[in-house]
Amino acid sequence: MATATAKPLNKESTLIYGFAPYQAKAGEEYMNSAQLTHFRNILEAWKRELMEEVDRTVHHMQDESANLPDPNDRATQEEEFSIELRARDRERKLIRKIDSTLKSIEEGDYGYCEECGVEIGIRRLEARPTATLCIDCKTLAEIKEKQTGG
């Protein structure tokens, strides 16, 4: 029976690619095998989802690539395809980033900042599983980028 303080979880907001957020235990070592497995599962599910979306787009474009006689219809279709291709290009880049992140898990580097070496943190990795910088280094990089117009 639920206690008076228990609140129902909103499944939409608590699941990360179908996985519940990692519940760290007191005194638990950072990036232990359970945590690495958790993030590997998230990354693999995310990659599968992206790959399926890319496949759907390819099939959609093949099905819709009719030779339309009206120039306006053709132009509209070409613009729609262009937008879809840009989105798929971003997804392909993200897939490469996911692959790189999975490799860092295998190499034992996952979860540590590439700049300063500190722990990135479970909460940040839950929000962005492909993060390679701690929040301080990322903030500093964004400030530098704004200053240089980069």
Image (cartoon, helix red, strand yellow):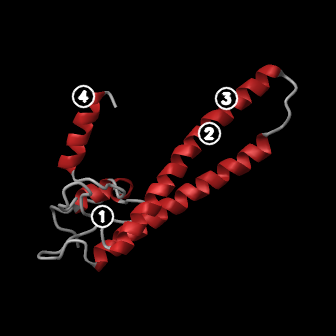
Residue in the image at 58% along x and 58% along y? 51
**SS category of the residue bearing label 4:** helix
Examine the rendered structure and indicate whether residue 115 appears above or below residue 141: below
Element on which disc 2 rests: helix
Q: Earlier in the sequence, mark 3 or mark 1?
A: 1
Please identify, in this view, whether the residue under mark 4 or under mark 2 is nearer the observer.
4
* Res 106 → quadrant: bottom left
Classify mark 1: residues with Cα within 10 Å, few (<14), some (14-19) or many (20+): some
- Would residue 129 appear left or right of 63 to someone viewing this image? left
Mark 2 near mark 1, Cβ–Cβ under 8 Å? Answer: no
- Which residue is depicted at the point 47% across and 52% down? 94
* Residue at which label 3 appears: 79
For badge 4, the amino acid type reads Gln
Q: Is residue 28 left or right of residue 47?
A: left
Give the total of numbered labels: 4
The location of residue 146, given as percent across then percent down, is 27, 30
Mark 4 vs 2, N-terminal side: 2
- As shown in the figure, which amino acid type bears the numbered disc 3? Glu
Query: Is the Cβ of the residue at disc 3 closer than 8 Å to that at disc 4?
Result: no
Q: Position of residue 37 (x, y in %)?
A: 36, 75
Select label 2 or label 1 by which is in front. 2
Mark 2 Cα-neighbour bin, 10 Å: few <14, some 14–19, many ≥20 = some
- What residue is shown at x 24% (from left), y 46% (from top)? 138
Res 13 visible: yes
Of callouts 2 and 3, the N-terminal one: 3
At numbered mark 3, what does the secondary structure look like: helix, strand or loop? helix
How far apart in space, not on screen, are marks 2 and 1 (Cα)? 31 Å
| Residue 111 horizontal side relative to residue 52, left or right | left
